[in-house]
Amino acid sequence: MSHREALVAAAEGLLWERGYEAMSPQAVLRVSGAGQGSMYHHFDGKKSLAIEALVRHESVLWERTMATLGNPEAGAFDAILAWLNSDRDALVGCRLGRLVNESSVRADGELRAPITRYFERLHELLIERIEQATERGELGRSIDPSLLADLLIAAIQGGYVLALATGDATRVATATTAATQLLHCYASQQSGTR
Amino acid sequence: MSHREALVAAAEGLLWERGYEAMSPQAVLRVSGAGQGSMYHHFDGKKSLAIEALVRHESVLWERTMATLGNPEAGAFDAILAWLNSDRDALVGCRLGRLVNESSVRADGELRAPITRYFERLHELLIERIEQATERGELGRSIDPSLLADLLIAAIQGGYVLALATGDATRVATATTAATQLLHCYASQQSGTR
DNA sequence: GTCTATACACAGATAGAC
DNA sequence: GTCTATCTGTGTATAGAC
């Protein structure tokens, strides 16, 4: 692994562990094994290194999402449930979602871009899957797909907050389980009224 | 206002605006108008000042919660909806929820205590209200009240994350609206099967 | 490309006078 | 209770040699 790659990998890890503001160049150097000179040779500074790490992490997360929600083999309703109930490391939190709470990230469009992009793509894919499920009569038409998509994303992101706040790793699963049960209820009501 | 109070008020504001790690003593002094000596006379240091500000903010939030969810005049189901759909300043985020993403807060039980306590009390009150609604036939029995409570809290907290990530202030309301509609669906299914 | 040395500002806290 | 002065560590970056 080149020093350049080692720097990005180290930044990705620290961004997840500490956040952006607390990711010190010093720590990046220690973890990556590179020297000060290397880092400032390959990158303009902390920010551009962080952006590269964020973009890389964005694609990792997206791949993971595609494996469940985007799976073309699965039916739309099943794909939504598979994604919603994926295993998640609750006490670690969402590496992208957590960053929007830092004012330096919030205020910087370049830093925020990979984060915004991930959530927007997720939102679009979810809407698509919800509409497919509706077409097939697996879900009712009384809820706007865009609103429902927001709730499902929020259930996961909010579950992380709840888990971290209480120190209870099960709280992401409890929230997504409740969402799953409400979806089933919504689905059965639909089939019952046909 | 005494210097002591001014310090706590300034800390509360900065904690909300910047977070704990980025709340510098220097900024607290500037905002409060107090001097260095004042601060270290009244408080052990940054951490104990932050704890006092957090405890104060916890009680503000709790009062706000009691006004809707805890309102004894309102029926249980209505109280839940009133709380869920309260106006929220999405692009500011939850002053308590945001802090659990900082590793220094996560790692410190004393700092985390007011945050944990708030979410646990909210969870308990929600369960109580959901059970009341169930007793009165306003909600079904197929979902565990504790799970449902987690989902509702997560909808709000996750809505904040989504709003901040996309820069779209409406995203808290979209998530809570979807939750409201699913609750109505769940409620009507219940009354339909009685 | 990588290294070491250096710079400067700020975080967080202490000292001691008033 | 409040003030100013001072201190040590670290974040972030530049300089310039190899």
Image (cartoon, coloured by chain):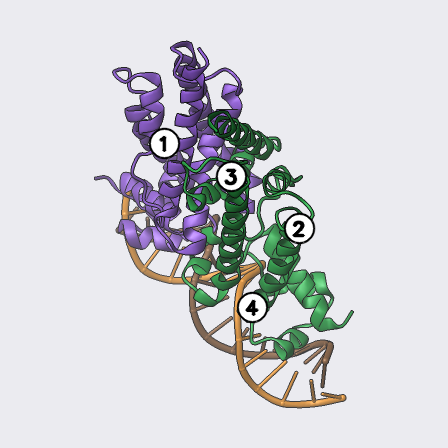
Chain colours: A purple, B green, C orange, D brown
Quadrant in which the N terminus of chain A is drawn: top left
x and y percent of residue A185 in the render?
Answer: 42, 27
Q: Which is nearer the N-term, disc 3 or disc 4?
A: 4
For the residues beneath circles 3 and 1, the answer to whether they share a chain is: no
Q: Which mark is residue A84?
A: 1
Q: CA distance from mark 3 to mark 4?
A: 27 Å
Q: CA distance from mark 1 to mark 2?
A: 35 Å
- Residues tagged 4 and 2 counted as in contact (Cβ below 8 A): no
B187 in relation to A26, above or below: above
Callout 2 secondary element: loop
Question: Mark 2 sits on what residue?
Answer: B72
Q: Amino acid at mark 4?
A: Lys
Chain under numbered label 1: A
Neighbour tally class for label 1: few under 14, some 14-19, many 20 plus, Cα within 10 Å: many
Image coordinates for residue A137, horizontal then vertical, percent:
40, 12
Mark 1: which amino acid? Leu
- The residue carrying mark 4 is B46
Residue B95 placement, left or right of A98: right
Q: CA distance from mark 2 to mark 3?
A: 31 Å
| Nearest to N terminus: mark 4 or mark 2 | 4
Q: Nearer the viewer, mark 1 or mark 2?
A: 2
The answer to whether one can see residue A2 in this image is yes
Relative height, residue B54 to residue B35 (above, below): above
